[in-house]
Amino acid sequence: MFTTSRSRPVLLAVASGGGHWVQMQRLRAAFDGADVHYATTDASAVEATRGGCVHVYPDANKQTPLRLMLCLIRLAWIVLRVRPDVVVSTGAAGGFLAIRIARLMGARTMFIDSIANARELSISARLSLGVADRVLSQWPRVAELSGAEYRGAVL
């Protein structure tokens, strides 16, 4: 839901470092016209956004439960501060957490699973199926088997 006091929608783009971040950067043109905020685990990503607003959160996964809690707290703070109209994530765990928090606030959400997941959806994408407005796989067969959507590949 877009707030009426803003002239442009606010988009929060959430991606872990590495390949998730690279895929998010390839989507940048799709964000034209929005006030874009990025959230990532990689503090060096600030240079890549060329002046965009970047928030950093701790990297975590199911093997690091304490860091996962810290990640959740930091992402909750980011989402509450940014108040996005839309959240887009290319993964991983932090992307799912941001989508979950943003949905509670009424934001529209999309999880785009990594191109590396050619056989099945990632855990974060599977969890997002029950939460996000859209979950996309970059592989037609994976989408067909999982219930995700296929709209092409980012790379």
Image: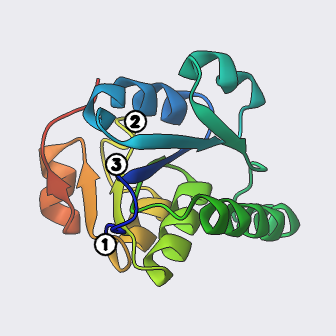
Of pointers 1 and 2, the one earlier in the residue sequence: 1
Of pointers 3 and 2, the one earlier in the residue sequence: 3
The numbered disc on residue 1 is 1
> Cβ–Cβ below 8 Å for labels 1 and 2?
no
- The residue under the point 68% across, 24% down is 46
Regarding mark 1 in the picture, which secondary structure is present there? loop
Q: CA distance from mark 1 to mark 2?
A: 32 Å
Residue 60: x %, y % from top left: 74, 55
- The residue under the point 39% across, 63% down is 85
> Cβ–Cβ below 8 Å for labels 3 and 1?
no
Please tell me whether mark 3 or mark 1 is closer to you in this view.
3
Q: How is the image coloured?
A: rainbow
Q: Amino acid at mark 2?
A: Ala
Q: Nearer the viewer, residue 56 or 84?
A: 84
Count of numbered tags: 3
Please tell me whether mark 1 or mark 2 is closer to you in this view.
1
Q: Nearer the viewer, residue 18 or 134?
A: 134
Residue 139, image quadrant? top left
Name the quadrant of the N terminus.
bottom left
- The residue under the point 37% across, 69% down is 3
Regarding mark 2 in the picture, which secondary structure is present there? loop
Please tell me whether mark 3 or mark 2 is closer to you in this view.
3
Residue 144: x %, y % from top left: 12, 60
**Which residue is denoted by mark 3 in the rendering?**
8
Position of 45 relative to 142 (above/below): above
Q: Amino acid at mark 1?
A: Met
Q: CA distance from mark 3 to mark 1?
A: 12 Å
The numbered disc on residue 43 is none
Residue 30: x %, y % from top left: 26, 34
Label 1: few (<14), some or many (≥20) within 10 Å? few
The numbered disc on residue 116 is 2
Of pointers 3 and 1, the one earlier in the residue sequence: 1
